[in-house]
Amino acid sequence: MAATRRGARTRQQIVEEAARLFNTHGFAGTSVNQVLDATGVAKGALYNHFASKEALALAAFDHAVAPLRTMVDQALGGDAPPEDRILAMLEGVRQIAHHRALPGGCPLTNTAAEADDAFPELRAKAIDLVRAWRTRLAGVLAEVASCGRYLLPAPPEELAGVMISMLQGAGLIAQLLGDASAVDDAVAFLHDRLEDCRITPA
Amino acid sequence: MAATRRGARTRQQIVEEAARLFNTHGFAGTSVNQVLDATGVAKGALYNHFASKEALALAAFDHAVAPLRTMVDQALGGDAPPEDRILAMLEGVRQIAHHRALPGGCPLTNTAAEADDAFPELRAKAIDLVRAWRTRLAGVLAEVASCGRYLLPAPPEELAGVMISMLQGAGLIAQLLGDASAVDDAVAFLHDRLEDCRITPA
């Protein structure tokens, strides 16, 4: 039992350190030895938890995007009015951009930028995440469109796609400028446009 | 004279190959030796043109973003009606996304993603490019706002920022998905929204 707990703790420590290193230096730029050095874990112990650098990178990616995934689930789920769930998601994106859990910027951006070098399974994971986010957001936008209080300018699926593009691009520019105000601007803009789409007075 | 021409040709060949390598593997992931191997140029000849790997990376970045810079200048310049110049820029972004001159995706995205590892001068160049694009676009949007045919939903500077975020993010998602349709969608969306802002019938 104690050994299992210790094993789980070691695994978690490896994943956290790997996420930090992969997010900063990329998949190609990070070696298993660097993870070993940073954690002080023995090579055998690491390979006990992860069969390969690839398996470790996949677990590290899941760890890195967990805040985004959890935020999207929580913000867009529940039974608040759909427009409030959209606004909660926008605020969640803003919070993530202002309080990055990992050095190196957005793990989705970094994975996309390295897509040529990274291995296909990692890219597939990032693609799944973007598609799941878009589908989820489109579903809530469809609720907004059908609730009778809003007239949206485009179909929910299209709106979800361009909203995610805008938020992701704002995150990229924030990462480049070292200043999250591009994300604040995108969130405020989308918030205001949603208000503009209201048919009945607030 | 012949030696000068040969020198210029060698320099150009080095820059093109370096742009290809840096854009695919990043600044940290590319060595001067790889550039030498890929070009077949002697080390002394390369250092004759570029004092350092840093100097080479700056020239390679300029080469990599030249299509974007030229497109923005041409589309937003001239004396066509300002709304047509915006539409020309949107179409230009779409063309660049569909016909990437370099492997490895968008050089701006790649530089932003590597910002932690890259050296400050490279990051500064990418920042300058984004700011110049935004300022230029905001200027043309100000013309649209004041021409009497459109009622824009936000100030030109803010609109320019969110438009560039959306286009850049769409490029990122296109790069991740290996499919430029996210850029087509963003361009079509912005085109339609501009039409929505028309006060007088087309």
Image (cartoon, coloured by chain):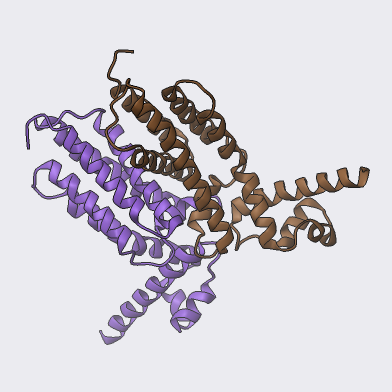
Chain colours: A purple, B brown
The image quadrant that residue B2 belongs to is top right
Residue drawn at 46 percent across, 50 percent down? A112
Closer-to-camera residue (B127/A96): B127
**Does residue A197 show up?**
yes
Q: Is residue B35 left or right of residue B183?
A: right
Rendered-image quadrant of the C terminus of chain A: top left
**Residue A10, x across and y down, in percent:** 36, 79
Q: Is residue A157 left or right of residue B132?
A: left
Residue drawn at 51 percent across, 59 percent down? B114
**Residue B43, x across and y down, in percent:** 82, 61
Q: Is residue A28 above or below residue B201?
A: below
**Residue B3, x across and y down, in percent:** 91, 47
Q: Is residue B149 above or below residue B114?
A: above
Q: Is residue A43 left or right of residue A148?
A: right
**Does residue A122 show up?**
no
**Residue B185, x across and y down, in percent:** 38, 31
Residue located farthest toward the top when viewing the structure as drawn: B201
Q: How many marks?
A: 0
